[in-house]
Amino acid sequence: MNRQEIVHKIENSGIVAVIRLNGAEHLDKIIDALADGGVRALEITMTTPNAVAIIRDISGSLSEEFLIGAGTVLDAPTAKDVIEAGAQFIVSPVFKPEIIEMAHQYDKAVIAGAFSATEILAAWETGSDIVKVFPATAVGPRYFKDIHGPLPGIKLTPTGGVTVDNAEEFIRYGAVCLGVGSALLDKNMISNQDWSGLTRRARQFTEAVERGRQH
């Protein structure tokens, strides 16, 4: 897929699962449970031990219905490493032009982090395919409506503070997709290997996105 196709697929997915683990144990079960709930866009964060190797393993074994991304990317060399390992999109908590430039050299999508209107516009004009509002915990869904008043064309996604209770509202106020971490990848469910519970949680999020898009 080229960059535009990747972005389109991220938007269609609605939910990007932010996978931040202590290792690869149970990762196959986690991915299967998420997929059964309709979540097939996966972001492996660089804070996960051996993240590059994990991305290489799953990108080579999962079907084309999945999108594999790398999160918490803080510099261009890391972006290069994860793309060469198989990452189709790069997510950063910050806006650094060199990360965008590196990913686009490989025709991969970038979701750069920003917070203020100035940062959001700068990231978008530099080429971020979607701009990640982070931490969204601090501003909530209405911030997206406020930003889209003067900046209606920018594709935004929240990360941080996205829950089952506010997911629909984020979409309704203009988010193109949602990055969801601990509210989706519940630590207790994972430690108890409650894969059916994880599937139900994933389905709650995907259904919330669908409701939000119907408004």
Image (spheres, rainbow, N blue to C red):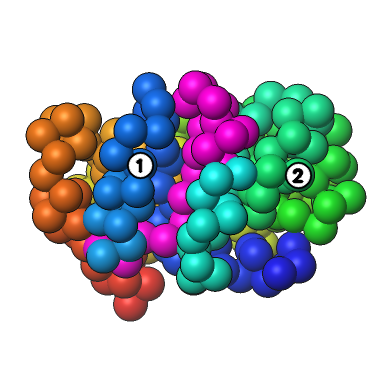
- State the separation of the CA atoms marked 1 and 2: 21 Å
Which of 113/144 is in front?
113
Quadrant of the image occupied by residue 94: top right
Q: Is residue 135 left or right of residue 212?
A: right
Going by the numbered disc 1, the residue's amino acid type is: Leu
Left or right of 98 in this view: 40: left
- The verdict on residue 19 being magenta is no
Residue occupying image coordinates x 11% and y 44%: 194
Where is residue 67 drawn, in percent x and y? 54, 59
Residue range highlighted in magenta: 37-55
Residue 75 in which image quadrant:
top right
Q: Position of residue 23 (x, y in %)?
A: 40, 27
Visible in this render: residue 102? yes
Binning the other alpha carbons within 10 Å of mark 1 as few (below 14), some (14 to 19) or many (20 upward) gives some
At 65% across and 48% down in the image, what residue appears?
Answer: 87
Residue 47 magenta = yes
- 44 or 143: which is nearer to us? 44
Quadrant of the image containing the C terminus: bottom left
* Amino acid type of the residue tagged 2 in the rendering: Glu
Can residue 162 be spotted in the picture?
no
Residue highlighted by disc 1:
27
Task: Classify 30 as above or below 78.
Answer: below
Identify whether 106 is placed above or below 210.
Answer: above
Mark closer to the chain start, 1 or 2: 1
Looking at the image, which residue is at 89% across and 50% down? 105
Label 1: state its secondary structure: helix
Q: Position of residue 191 (x, y in %)?
A: 17, 30
Residue at image mark 2: 84
